[in-house]
Amino acid sequence: MRSILPALIVLLVAVTPVLAPTSQVLLTLAFAKGLAVLGIIVLLQAGQVSFGHALYFAVSAYVAASVARSFGGELVTTLLAGVAAAAVVGLVVGVFVVRYRYIFFAMLNLAVSMIFFALLEKFYYVTGGSDGLQVPRPTVVGLTLERGEFETILFYGALVLSLLAAWGTHRYLASPLGNMLRAIKTNEVRLEYLGVSARSTLLSGYVLSAALCGLGGALMAVAQGIVTPEYAYWVRSGEFVFIAILGGSGSVAGAFVGALIYEGVRTYAAAFASDIWQMVLGIVLLVIIIFGPSGVTGLYQRLMDRLVGPARPRGAGDSERAPGAAE
Amino acid sequence: MNLQLFALAFFDGIAYAALVFLVAVGLTLIFGVLRVLNVAHGSFYAMGAYATASTVGAIVAAGYSPWLAFPMMIIASALIGGLIGGPVEKLLLRRIYDMEEVLQILVTFAVFMILEDVQRLVWGVQPYFESSALMVLGTVDVLGITYTAYQLILLPVVAILVLVGLRIFLRHTLSGKLILAVTEDREAATAIGVNVDRVYLVTFVVGASLAAFGGALASATTSVIPGMGADMIVLSFAVVATAGLGRIEGAAITALLIGLGRSFAVYLAPELDVLVPYLIMLAVLLVRPEGLFGMAHTRKI
């Protein structure tokens, strides 16, 4: 019962290229952002928020762009190269930042991303400066495609990747490792007393989140055909956090629900409010935090609970589960 | 590097450190008392700069004395701190003190996003440049270098006055002692009748005004542009984190360290100037996670 609507939405999205071809690119971009937001949600499960995850989005996008430019670029290798670069950078930065919690964690991530943003603008002979880099259209299994065909393939690729990533992340969060990750939020000391290293647990989550942001970034680079330093700017990091809270940080579905709503509203409403867009986001963020901290998916869960009775607790779906990791 | 260049870098560093200190001390004061790290702090800095640059510009254009720039800086920063900082604490932050830490961070981040657009709506996106205050104080010659008196003398003196003033205020006045009492133990302070709500409000307004004052002073030396708030919040966080959250005197020393580090980088390794503050912060935090002057927390079980 409660999975009818989500299944319908997935179906509806899947037939979009046939029904409404104009929104195809928009949805591809929404998936790219949704993947990055999924990374933020992994960290939120551990009670941590990062204001700098656009870093991984940008690292991956720039690496994907460089690969596509210098090696002629096959779609799969371009994406893989981007994700691998993001994961490696995530590991290096992660080793350092997982020693910190809360505001330190948030701000250190922000600091690293601001440094990268500054470097992107400064080393213009490598990165193209504030003009960015053009990304040539990659080939797909060796075939050079027309724009329309490529966009359709990219759309379905993004849809499949998003479903896979959502499923994988859900499995990760439901696994013992994922449970330990959530124990960092509820009771880190207890976790340590059980003999589990909170740092290496958080590091695993951090690298996963960096890789997810990387996947989103590489996809965005290929879909847009250009990468700019804006990819690493704090506004984008803030956008990811915003979408995570909007969709609901308790579940993996929240990332994509949030991203679809956000991109939809942004495309059609931002024209009326382009000057005050940050302000609108800020106000909505405040309203959600103060009145409905579980986001859109949380509202849906509550509605369903009322209609068909409470669900049995499932893995990553519920944030109120008992605090212990390995009881 | 010859002596003149060295002196030049040194003066640049001092002037820069004085400005960063004013913003950072407000941030660390607010954190020490409210236990909330205010991400919107950079916005107060930017708005102080905008308010000063635009009003001083109008005053000078109307033919009044450029000396009016100095009282204008104080008025503008007090207004920003009181009229914007006050409501933010009273209407918003007050609701979130009991929330999870991650939500508190998000709330101040939301305020930051809102205030960024408020600046754009009020002052537009074109840069403001208004250096009457800098000009009117003239220059001084030291070690064969001509440097502006505003940056070499006024800024450091103001920073030291604020540092000493804050210390006297906190240790030797009733309001200051109340603030210290709340910092030490909020519940005990409430139990003996301290009005904690008021203390929070006063602290936040003072901290926000200090940030705005930093911006007001900075507006005479640089163009006021969109995005300066975001840069400043990260930089002042670097200062505050390096010193140890809540350490006021420590923030002064760290501001000096980071200011000098950055200005020497400008002359020695220009590509790295934006990186130096963060490299200093990362180096310190790797060795002492609680900051240079912070105290290690005992673990709560």
Image (cartoon, helix red, strand yellow):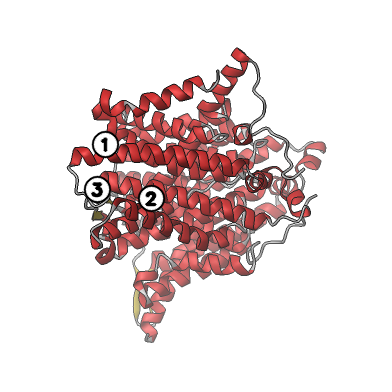
Q: Which chain's residue wears label 1?
A: A
Circle 2: is it few (<14), some (14-19), or many (20+) Cα within 10 Å?
A: many
Residue B246 in the image, given as x and y percentages of width and height: 64, 55
- Marks 2 and 1, the one that precedes in the sequence: 1
Q: Name the amino acid, label 3.
A: Gly
Secondary element under disc 2, as helix, strand or loop, is loop
Q: Nearer the viewer, residue B249 or B286?
A: B286
Q: Same chain for the residues at labels 2 and 3, yes or no?
A: yes
Q: Name the amino acid, label 1.
A: Thr
> Label 2, label 1: how many angstroms apart (C-alpha)?
29 Å
Q: Same chain for the residues at labels 2 and 1, yes or no?
A: yes
Secondary element under disc 3, as helix, strand or loop, is loop
Q: Which mark is residue A225?
A: 3
Q: Same chain for the residues at labels 1 and 3, yes or no?
A: yes
Circle 1: is it few (<14), some (14-19), or many (20+) Cα within 10 Å?
A: some
Residue A139 in the image, given as x and y percentages of width and height: 24, 51
Which mark is nearer the camera, 2 or 3? Answer: 3
Is A292 left or right of A117, judged from the image as shown? right
Q: Which chain's residue wears label 3?
A: A
Q: Can you see residue B112?
A: no
> Label 2, label 3: how many angstroms apart (C-alpha)?
18 Å
Is A69 left or right of B26, judged from the image as shown? left
